[in-house]
Amino acid sequence: MRLVQVLIPNGTRESVLAALDEETIDYAVWEETGRGDFEALVSFPIPESGVEPVLDRLESAGIREDAYTIVMATETVISERTNLLEKRYKGLRISREELVARAEELAPAGSTYVAFLVLSTMIATAGLLSDSAATIIGAMVVAPLMGPAITASVGTVLGDERLASRGVTFQVFGLCLAIAVGATMGFLLKDTFMLPPELDIREIPQVAERTTPTFLSLFLALGSGIAGAISVMRNAGSALVGVAIAVALIPPAATAGLGLAWGFDGVALAAGTLVLVNLLAINLSALVLFYLAGYRPVGDESFDQRAIRRSVIKRLAGIGVGMLLLSVVLGGVTAAEYLTHEIEIELTREAAAMLDDPEYDGLNYEGITTEFDFVDYATSEAYEIEILVGVEEGTAVPPDLAQQFDDHLTEATGLDIAVRVGFLDEQVSDRATA
């Protein structure tokens, strides 16, 4: 429930109260004793989904923005008289006016935004370099990225260019700043005693996770955008949802910065692509949800509803084209990941099957120690894998076992790879006899 208080301008008291009577809303009226610009104060309770239609009625009755309308959330309302209103005004979304207020509240002042963004990126970068998932998640609590994403979408559907522009500007500037902070920290920490000597960031699992963006990444971003829109529309859980949005943006931005610091163009490009895809997906899902929820500008002659619709469609089209182009990269990585795992399974199966042949009795397959990577295989002139073989005591090892593996795997898989074989001396206990 909401408690609405309205200062009634001179000459509009009768029309305002008549509008409330037509809506069968209980209200209380007090005479205004201020400077004389208003003649009364009216106060009434209303379900949150009824705020917008009632305020539209009051606007028609003479309540303009130069008056005062205050909408307050209530802790508890004890009355059976509210049941009829709740049945009439069904739904859970907040009013258009409250939505704008929530969006502006979520987008902090510039200095606060920059401070929290820098701090969250510093923490996330430290978490990436130390391979600490807990540290990275902790950094997301600080990141202030939910506000700008929601603000941009709200401003678009409501035709508020100032709000939309502010949201877009904050997002673009913020992510560029996050990449710069990550790069700066990388340059400062690289080759210092705080990191292992000759550290290759590509081998850090938390970094590698953000340099192989697949279509699965879209689910995080789309889900975060939808959750953000729902949390704002229903005024619940925004802080936790903000963490999900930040997880989709800050770690890959910091990873891109580290790629620049270490001079790994592939890392910077892959992580940067992930940042852009996630950013577009969050904005797309939030914008669609707000529009489908029925949020529109104030329905008077000052707004062309068709122009707003065209603006929304235009922005959706722009985001869609951007995602489509970037999806080429996601599709390539997704396909490469699938082929990598598929070929790795096939290599393992065929290598083990070969040693199951009786002629290799006493030789046991232990595993492939070099992980197969389809991208490296496709770009390398000589890709080599190492197979570990256990040799039981007294077993003679064929001198050309590596070549036999090579021939067998080439025939079975069609892959042109070089094979290195490592041996592990084994002792096997006597088998129990029945």
Image (tube, rainbow, N blue to C red):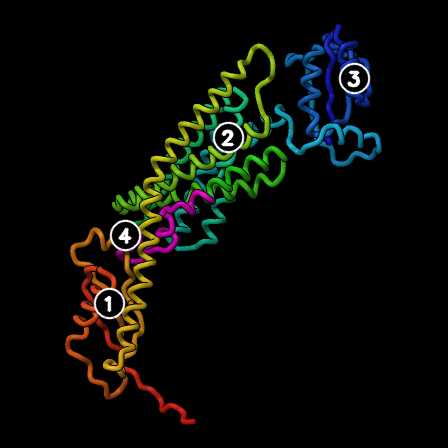
The one nearer the camera, 333 or 116, is: 333
**Mark before the other along the chain sequence, 1 or 2:** 2
Separation (CA) of disc 3 from disc 1: 82 Å
Q: CA distance from mark 4 to mark 2?
A: 44 Å
**Which label sits in the foreground, 4 or 1?**
1
* Local SS, label 3: helix
List x then y, in percent, for residue 29.
81, 17
**Any mark on residue 22, and which?**
3
Q: Which residues are magenta?
A: 194-219
- Where does label 4 land, which residue? 191
Indicate which disc residue 386 carries. 1
Residues under numbered marks 3 and 4 in contact, where contact means CB atoms less than 8 Å apart: no
Q: Amino acid at mark 1?
A: Glu
Residue at x-position 30% and y-position 59%: 343
Amino acid at dot 4: Asp
Proximity of marks 2 and 3: CB atoms separated by less than 8 Å: no
